[in-house]
C-alpha cells in the first residue's frame, strides 16, 4: 500500500511545488485534447476528447466490476462514433442530433424500472406489511432505521409538500407532478447504480427533469411560471454528481457494516439535513449580497436559459422523444442480454454513464485500470487480484491526502493552489 501511496502522493507533492515554483519540473497537469488532430469532416464531429490520467481514478476503477469499467470507456467511444456516423450521413444538420442527453435520460429511466422490477417482491411485501400487518420473512424490522409505515407516510407527505410549494410558487399542478416524478425516477436509477456498481460519475448535465420536459415537449407547452420555477430548481437539477440519495445509502451501508445503531444514524442524518439546509441558505445569501447574484456560480446560466425559453419558444421535438425511447429500450436490451448470456461484456449502466460530461475526464483512466485488472485476472487470477488491492488503495489515499493538503492550504491562506482533479 505504501508503494502506491508514495507514487500517487509523490506526483501530487511535486506538482504542488511546481505550481508554487515553476522552476520545479512537474508531471503532466494538463488535459491533452485529441480534437485538434481531427480537423476535417467527418472526424471533426468527435468534439472535445481529452485523454487525462488521474491516479485516484485508476485506483477507484480497479474496484469496479470488470464489465462496467469496460462498458464505460467502450460506450464513451461509442458516443463519439455516433457523432462521426451522424456527420457521415449528414444528420448533424438536424438540431441536437444525436440527442445524447435524451438517450441518457431514457437510459436512466430504464435503470430505475430495472431496479424496481428487481425488488418487486420486497416492495410487495413492504406494502403487505404496511396495509395488512404481514411480517416480512428473513428480516428484523427492529433493525430498520425507520418503520415501513413511517417511511411510506413520510414519502407521501414530503411529495405532497413539494407539489404544494411548487404550485404556490407559480407552477401548474401537472407540470410540478411530472417534474418531481421524473426527478425521483432518476434518483432511484442513480442510487441503485451507485450502490451496486460504484459508478464514478452520474452527473447528467443537461439531462435532468426540467431539461427532459422542455427538450421533449417544447417550452410552448409550459407557462411562464413553470419555466421560471424550472430555472429556480436548476440548483439541484443542473447535474446530479452530488446527489444526496446515493451518499445516504452508502452511509447506511457503512453504518450497517460497522454495526452502528441504524436508528441513531437515521436521526443523525435528519439533524444534519436540517442544520445544513439553514447554513446553506445563510451561505448563499451571504455570497449573493457580497458578490452579487449574477457573479455567483451558475446563476447567470439558469436565467439566461429562462430568457431563451421565453423569447424563443420551442415546439414538440419528436426526435428527442424518439431518442429517449431508444435509450430506454437499449438499456433493457443490454440488461436482458447480460442476464441470459454469461459472456456478454456490456453493462447497461455503462451505456447510461458514458455520455456524462465527467466521463470526458475519467474514461482514459478507467481504460488504463481495465487493462491492468484484465491482465491481472488473466495471468494471476483472484489471488494476484487480492494482492494488488493494497497497492491501488494506496494510490487512492496518496492522491486524496497529498492533493487534499494542497487544496486545504489554498483554502486557509486564500491563495490559488494546485488542484489534482483538473
Image (spheres, helix red, strand yellow):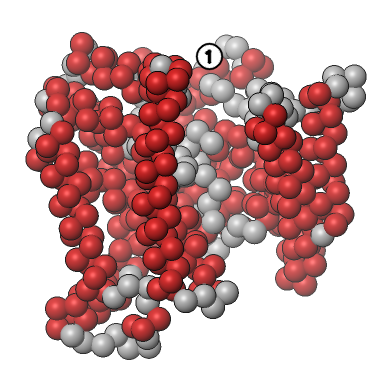
Classify residue 31 as left or right of residue 252: right
Q: Is residue 31 visible?
A: no
* Image spot of residue 245 (x, y percent): 40, 54
Q: Relative to 241, does residue 250 appear above or below in the rendering?
A: below
* Image spot of residue 157 (x, y percent): 18, 58
At x 68%, y 55%, the residue is 62
Q: Quadrant of residue 237?
A: top left
- The quarter of the picture where the C terminus appears is top right
At x 26%, y 74%, the residue is 148
At x 26%, y 14%, the residue is 307
Q: Relative to 159, does residue 88 appear above or below in the rendering?
A: above
* Image spot of residue 29 (x, y percent): 74, 28
Q: In front here: 411 or 69? A: 411
- The quarter of the picture where the N terminus appears is bottom right
Q: Relative to 50, does residue 372 appear above or below in the rendering?
A: below
In this view, the residue farthest toward the left is: 173
Tag 1 residue: 41
At x 57%, y 11%, the residue is 40
What crowding class fits label 1: few (fewer than 14 Cα within 10 Å), some (14-19), or many (20 or more)?
Answer: few
Classify residue 68 as left or right of residue 378: left
Q: In front here: 363 or 240? A: 240
Q: In front here: 332 or 265? A: 265
* Image spot of residue 89 (x, y percent): 41, 21
Classify residue 218 as left or right of residue 35: left
- SS at mark 1? loop
Q: Is residue 169 visible?
A: yes
Classify residue 29 as left or right of residue 245: right
Q: In front here: 295 or 289? A: 289
For the image shown, how many numbered marks are present on the structure? 1
Q: Quadrant of residue 223?
A: top left
Q: Relative to 292, does residue 61 appear above or below in the rendering?
A: below
Amino acid at each position: 500500500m505504501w508503494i502506491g501511496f508514495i507514487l500517487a502522493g509523490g506526483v501530487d507533492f511535486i506538482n504542488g511545488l511546481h505550481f508554487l515554483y515553476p522552476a520545479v519540473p512537474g508531471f503532466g497537469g494538463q488535459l491533452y485534447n485529441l480534437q485538434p488532430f481531427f480537423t476535417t469532416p467527418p472526424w471533426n464531429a468527435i468534439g472535445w476528447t481529452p485523454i487525462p490520467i488521474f491516479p485516484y481514478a485508476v485506483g477507484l476503477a480497479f474496484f469496479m466490476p470488470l464489465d462496467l469499467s469496460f462498458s464505460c470507456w467502450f460506450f464513451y467511444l461509442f458516443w463519439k462514433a455516433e457523432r462521426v456516423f451522424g456527420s457521415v450521413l449528414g444528420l448533424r444538420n438536424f438540431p441536437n442530433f444525436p440527442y445524447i442527453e435524451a438517450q441518457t435520460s431514457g437510459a436512466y429511466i430504464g435503470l430505475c424500472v430495472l431496479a424496481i422490477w428487481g425488488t418487486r417482491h420486497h416492495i410487495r411485501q413492504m406494502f403487505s406489511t404496511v396495509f395488512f400487518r404481514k411480517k416480512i420473512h428473513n428480516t428484523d424490522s427492529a433493525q430498520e432505521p425507520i418503520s415501513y409505515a413511517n417511511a411510506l407516510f413520510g414519502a407521501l407527505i414530503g411529495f405532497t409538500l413539494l407539489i404544494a410549494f411548487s404550485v404556490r410558487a407559480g407552477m401548474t399542478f401537472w407540470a410540478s407532478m411530472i417534474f418531481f416524478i421524473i426527478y425521483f425516477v432518476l434518483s432511484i436509477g442513480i442510487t441503485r447504480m451507485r450502490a451496486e456498481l460504484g459508478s464514478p460519475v452520474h452527473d447528467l448535465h443537461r439531462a435532468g427533469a426540467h431539461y427532459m420536459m422542455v427538450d421533449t415537449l417544447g417550452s410552448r407547452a409550459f407557462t411562464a411560471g413553470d419555466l421560471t420555477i424550472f430555472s429556480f430548481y436548476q440548483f439541484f437539477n443542473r447535474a446530479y454528481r452530488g446527489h444526496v440519495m446515493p451518499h445516504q445509502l452508502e452511509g447506511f451501508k457503512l453504518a450497517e457494516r460497522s454495526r452502528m445503531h441504524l436508528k441513531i444514524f437515521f436521526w443523525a442524518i435528519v439533524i444534519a439535513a436540517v442544520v445544513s439546509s439553514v447554513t446553506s441558505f445563510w451561505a448563499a445569501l451571504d455570497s449573493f449580497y457580497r458578490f452579487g447574484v449574477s457573479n455567483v456560480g451558475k446563476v447567470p446560466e439558469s436565467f439566461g436559459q429562462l430568457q431563451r425559453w421565453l423569447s424563443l419558444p420551442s415546439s414538440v421535438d419528436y426526435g428527442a422523444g424518439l431518442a429517449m425511447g431508444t435509450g430506454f429500450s437499449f438499456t433493457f436490451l443490454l440488461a436482458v442480454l447480460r442476464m441470459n448470456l454469461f459472456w456478454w461484456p456490456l453493462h447497461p449502466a455503462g451505456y447510461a454513464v458514458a455520455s456524462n460530461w465527467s466521463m470526458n475526464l475519467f474514461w482514459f483512466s478507467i481504460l488504463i485500470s481495465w487493462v491492468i485488472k484484465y491482465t491481472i485476472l488473466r495471468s494471476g487470477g483472484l489471488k494476484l487480484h487480492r494482492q494488488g488491492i493494497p497497492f491501488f488503495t494506496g494510490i487512492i489515499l496518496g492522491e486524496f491526502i497529498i492533493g487534499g493538503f494542497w487544496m486545504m492550504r489554498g483554502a486557509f491562506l486564500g491563495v490559488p493552489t494546485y488542484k489534482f482533479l483538473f
